Image (cartoon, grey):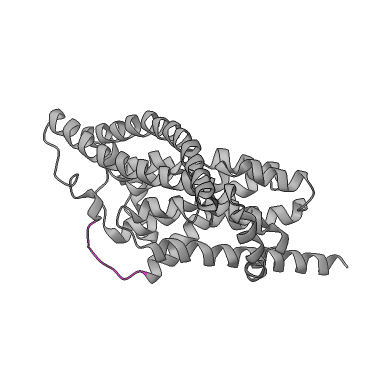
Amino acid sequence: MAIRHSLNRLYRCVRLALPRSLNICLWLLKVMLPISLAVRVLQYVGVIDWLAGYLSPVFSYIGLSGDSAFVFLTSIFLPLYPTIAVMTTLTITLREATILAVMCLISHNLPVECSVAHKTGSRFGEIVAFRIAMSFVSAIVLNWLLPHSNVPFIFLASTTTKVASWGMLFTQWFTSSLTLVVTIVLIVSALMILQRVLEEFGWMHRIAHSLSPLMRLFGLPPGCSLLWLTGNVVGMAYGAAIMIDEVEQGRLTRDEANLVNHHLGVSHSLLEDTMLFVAMGISFWWLFLTRLILAMVAVWAMRLYTHIRQANYT
C-alpha cells in the first residue's frame, strides 16, 4: 500500500510537471528559433564579421574572438536558451566555448534576475554591474588556467562548413536547431519532474537543513540554505517566489539576502544551466567549480569590505 501511494505521488509529480515543461519548451521555440535564424543571416551577409572587427581587440584579452561578444551581449538581455542558439551558430574552439559558457552562466537574463535580486535586498544597478564584472573576472581566470588548444567545439560540427547559398543556410539552421531543441526539451522536462518530486516528498527542506555548514563555508548565513538550494535547483527566475517569501516572512534580513544575491549572481542554477552546456560537450567541472569558487571569494570579499568600513566608522 505504501509503495502504491508513493508511486501515485510520483505519477502526480510527472503529470503536473510535464504541462509546465511543455509550456516552457513552446516558449523556447518561439524565442530561440527566430534568434538563431537571424544570427545565421547576419553571419551570411557579413554583419558578424563587421562587429568582430571592432570587438576582437577587447575580447582577445580574455581568450575570445570578437564574434563571441555577440553571444555574451545576447546573454545579458535574454535567458540562456536563445543565447545557446546564438552560440551554436559560431565557429569556435572548445576552449573558447568553455570561457564563453561561464561568462554567459554568470551574466544572463539580467533584467529579470536582477529585478528579483532588487526586490530581495540588492540594488539593481549594483548587481548588474557586479555580475558583468564577475563574468570578465571568470574569463580572465579561465584564460589563464585553461591549456591552449585548437580542439573544435564538437557541437558545431554540422555548422562549420561555409554557407554557399540561402538554401544551405536554411538547411543547416533547421538541422542544428532541431538537435538543440530535442536536447533542451529532454533536460527541461527531467528537471521540472525533479523539482516536483523534491517538493512533493519534502526533500527540499531536509536537504536545505543539511546544507547549513556549507553556507558557513560560503560566507552565507546558515538560515539561507533553502534560498541557496532553490536558486541552484530551479534558478533565480523560477525560484523568485521562494526567494521573495523568505525575506518578506523575516527569515532573512535584507543584508543577508544581499549576500545571497551576490553569491547566486555568480553561481546559480548549478544543475539545469550547467547541464545545458555539458550536453554540448563542455566540461562539467570547469563550469561548476569556477562559478562556485568565485561566488565564495566574492562573498568573503564583500564581508571583509563591510568589516573594514564599519571599523573605520567606529
Q: Where is residue 38 in the image (x, y as percent from the top left)?
A: 30, 31
Q: Give the camera-side residue of 292 and 130.
A: 292
Q: What stretch is highlighted in magenta?
A: 146-152
Note whether 59 is above or below 27 in the view shown: below
| Number of marks drawn | 0
Rendered view: 163 above or below 91: above
Left or right: residue 82 versus residue 131 is: left
The answer to whether residue 130 shows anywhere in this view is no
Image location of residue 186, percent across then percent down:
35, 44
Above-or-below relation of 251 to 145: above
The C terminus lies in which quarter of the figure? bottom right
Based on the picture, tell me whether residue 59 belongs to the magenta stretch. Answer: no
Q: Nearer the viewer, residue 263 or 50?
A: 263
Q: Which residue is drawn at 69% across and 41% down?
A: 119
Q: Is residue 1 something one can see in this rendering? A: yes
Across and down, in percent, residue 254 comes to: 76, 50
Q: In which quarter of the image is residue 88?
A: top left
Residue drawn at (14%, 45%) of the image: 161
Furthest residue toward left: 164
Q: Position of residue 90 (x, y in %)?
A: 27, 46
User: Outermost residue, right direction?
Assistant: 314
Is 149 in the magenta? Answer: yes
* Residue in view at x 60 percent, y 63 percent: 298
Residue at left 36%, top 40%?
Answer: 185
In the image: residue 22, left or right of residue 4: left
The answer to which quarter of the image holds residue 63 is bottom left
Majority secondary structure in the magenta region = loop
Direction from residue 265 to residue 148 in the image, left or right: left
